[in-house]
Amino acid sequence: MKPVLQVALDLENLKRAVQIAKESVKGGADWVEAGTPLIKSEGMNAVRTLKKIFPKHVIVADMKTVDVGRFEVEMAAKSGADVVCVLGVSDDDTIKESVKAGRQYGAKIMVDLFSVDDKVKRAKEVELMGVDYICIHTSIDEQMRGKIVFDDVKKVSKSVRIPVAVAGGINSENVLPALKSGADIIIVGGSITKEKNVTNATRRIKKAIKEKKVVKSKIKKHTEKDLSWVFSKVSTPNISDAMHRKGAMTGILPLKKGYKMVGKALTVKTMDGDWAKPVEAIEKAKKGDVIVIDANGGKIAVWGELASWSCKMKKISGVVIDGAVRDVDDIIKMGFPVFAKNVAPNAGEPKGYGEIGAEVICGGQKVKNGDWVVGDDSGVVVVPKENAVEIGNRALDVMEKENRIREEIKRGSVLSVVMELEKWEKI
């Protein structure tokens, strides 16, 4: 089978999906998929609409069928689907009934081995049941944790004679290893649908498929070593959205606009006005760290110009203070990022109460040593170190989706229309 490019329209809004589909087809997409979110949102009307607009293209209905296979395949096929997706974790009878319905109503069956443990074994089983395609699928949640590998594609493609599709995190930079692993159908979602210029994004991936080469991409998933770069690219609102509107400190603001602070937390617990431990922490901090000081919202300064100069010389990324800072004019002049709850001219005494490296509460958020701390004009967010890779990738995902919506607004729409807010208001 000659490799084909399938664009996955995993959106909730049919109007937006159609617009993106038109641009992707213009860029060379071969198959058009009504993604599961689109089908759940718009029902079979999504499949009917896509078939009507693209009658010469293969329309895929990603039903993710797990039960009543005959009924769901019949429904999708009658609506115009040329390929219907069924989950490999389904009962054998569900898959067999899906195949029978597909033969009866003129649709082919793709079995998605999503969450199947022994993919090779299951691929061989469903091939004997008469399915037409196998799909190896890395879920979005797995992608966010940085998992995009093609080992299963290689194993399955060598074990079956039917075409194998690959989905999840595919872009123009990893198409080549996907093809080398034996993939015949390249399924691409976000690397096309979230781009400002969908047509050009599709052309890049199509070029990578045709020429069997790596083509530079703007979208990719990142690992632990990339996190500083990732968090520097996104905004604190992007990160908060990625954390389901959590992680934001309250009442902690930058001394001036224009700061961008990213780093791992070195935590400090102190008393109001006691600046001993905050200053001692500078010596312990590493290049790129953010010193996070819990002074219990105090109003006597625990930080000032000289401490800031010490940090600047050590290339510490910034300081966050749930308490007070002074020498604001001098700190602003040196350009060192300081975020604080209060400003006061008077400092206290270095008594040495408190500790360095313990869990603290800053701006209402729990902060542990090594958590990621990001600050900008909107404030400060804390990302727990144990799931920082996932949150970083999700924040990029939020940013990319907003970029696409922004592009549609610039073309003459407005936010409420793009998002179809009235349709989705709670009844």
Image: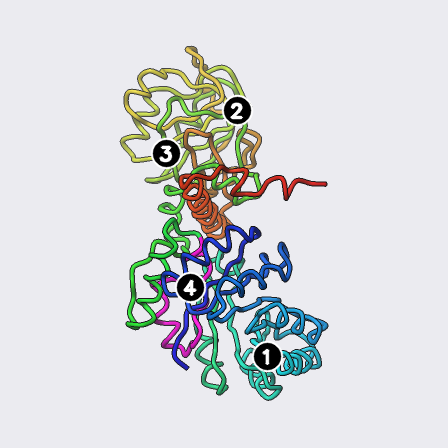
Per the image, is 185 magenta? yes
- Gap between marks 1 and 4 measured at Cα: 29 Å
Residue occupying the point 36% across, 57% down: 199
Dot placed on the residue nearer the N-terminal end, 2 or 1 = 1
Dot placed on the residue nearer the N-terminal end, 2 or 4 = 4
Q: Nearer the viewer, mark 4 or mark 3?
A: 4
Residue occupying the point 46% across, 60% down: 189
Q: Nearer the viewer, mark 2 or mark 4?
A: 4
The three-letter amino acid code for the residue at tag 4 is Ile
The three-letter amino acid code for the residue at tag 1 is Gly
What is the x, y in percent for residue 316?
34, 35
State the quadrant of the N terminus. Answer: bottom left
- CB-based contact (under 8 Å), mark 2 and mark 1: no
Dot placed on the residue nearer the N-terminal end, 1 or 4 = 1
Q: Which residue has dot 3 on it? A: 260
Element at label 2: loop
Q: Which residue has dot 4 on it? A: 170
Dot placed on the residue nearer the N-terminal end, 4 or 3 = 4
- Gap between marks 2 and 1 measured at Cα: 61 Å
Q: Which residue has dot 1 on it? A: 106
With respect to residue 1, does 361 lie above or below? above
Q: Which residues are magenta?
A: 171-193
